[in-house]
Image (tube, helix red, strand yellow):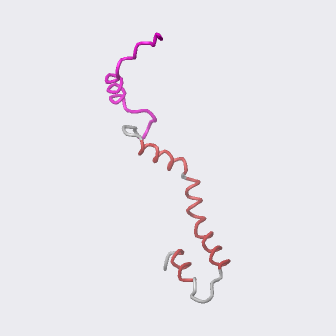
Amino acid sequence: MIPITLGIYKYIGNNTTQWNSIMAAAVVASVPAAVLLVVAQRYVAAGVTAGAIKGLSRTSDRPPRSHRRRCRASAPPPAAPWTGP
């Protein structure tokens, strides 16, 4: 048993190439992956976002408490308002 993509590759001949059949097989081969992505889109997006933000826990969309305290304590004091020339 071989993967369908390898079967498509082997189907392409040296002299005769039936592009209609090859493209139809490629679409049929991509349908399961597309359906799986549509079904799991929420989880894929959440995983990509959680992996891109340092310190973000997997169960919530806010950083852990220790991170929030540390960031608040290390923030510089607000600048004095500009009074103009």
Residue 82 is one of the magenta-drawn residues: yes
Quadrant assignment, res 55: top left
Q: Residue at x 65, y 78 (%)?
A: 19
Q: Nearer the viewer, residue 58 or 26?
A: 26
Quick one: 26 or 15, which is closer to the camera? 15
Residue that appears at 65% across and 82% down: 18
Up-down: is 55 above or below 32? above
Left or right, 13 with reference to 61: right
Q: Which picture quadrant has residue 53?
A: top left
Residue situated furthest right in the rendering: 20
Q: Residue at x 34, y 25 (%)?
A: 69
What count of labels does the image hold?
0
| Magenta region, main secondary structure | loop
- Residue 61 part of the magenta segment: yes
Please say if 55 is above or below 81: below
Horizontal and vertical percent position of residue 61: 46, 35
Q: Which residues are magenta?
A: 58-85
Left or right: where 34 falls relative to 78: right
Q: Where's residue 4, x and y in %?
A: 54, 75
Residue 41 position (above or below residue 26): above
Residue at 62 percent across and 74 percent down: it is 25
Judged left or right of residue 10, residue 73 is left
Tell which residue pokes out farthest to the front in this image. 85
The image shows residue 85 at horizontal and vertical percentages of 47, 11
Reply above or below: 43 against 24: above
